[in-house]
Amino acid sequence: MDKEPEVVEAEVVEQKGASDFQKALAVFFVIFSMLYAVSPIDLVFDTMPVVGWLDDLGFLITATLNVVQQFTKDQNSSMVKILKYTKWLLVVATIIAALLLGGLLVSLGLLIAYAVG
């Protein structure tokens, strides 16, 4: 009368890539970052040397890394994890560099204005 319990095997679903929505969103961000790079409307104006181009370059590189990450077939690979962390590190580094260089340029401008006036 002792019946052995039935063992039901769970089906393993492997993710072989990002969803179509994630891929489309990644392509949209690349197109948007290209338009942002050539647009005269920026977070930091391009007339400021280095800092003005830094945000454009940061957006372009981040969007490109995102596309590579989303179009990688195996989303569990170590390359995808490295790209993910590199992407966020680049975002933080771009923000910090823009703030530091922007503050330096503003301080230099104020110093020159104070010395002249």
Image (cartoon, grey):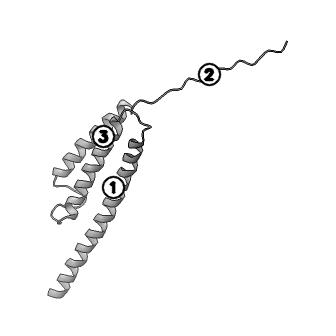
Q: Give the residue type that dot 2 points to.
A: Glu
Residue 117 seen in this snapshot:
no
- Percent across and percent down for residue 74 are 40, 34
Q: Earlier in the sequence, mark 2 or mark 1?
A: 2
Quarter of the picture containing the C terminus is bottom left
Write down the quadrant of residue 95 in the picture. bottom left
Quarter of the picture containing the N terminus is top right
Disc 3 packing (10 Å; few <14; some 14–19; many ≥20): many
- Percent across and percent down for residue 106 are 24, 74
Q: Is residue 82 above or below residue 95?
A: above
What whole-number distance in Å separates the C-alpha atoms at marks 1 and 3?
A: 15 Å
Q: Secondary structure at mark 3?
A: helix
The disc placed on residue 90 is 1
Can you tell which of label 2 and label 3 is closer to the viewer? Answer: 2
Residue under circle 2? 9
Q: Is residue 94 left or right of residue 35?
A: right
Q: Give the residue type that dot 1 points to.
A: Leu
Q: Is residue 16 above or below residue 113?
A: above
Outermost residue on the front side: it is 78
Q: Secondary structure at mark 1?
A: helix
Q: Is residue 35 left or right of residue 75?
A: left
Write down the quadrant of residue 45 in the picture. bottom left
The disc placed on residue 67 is 3
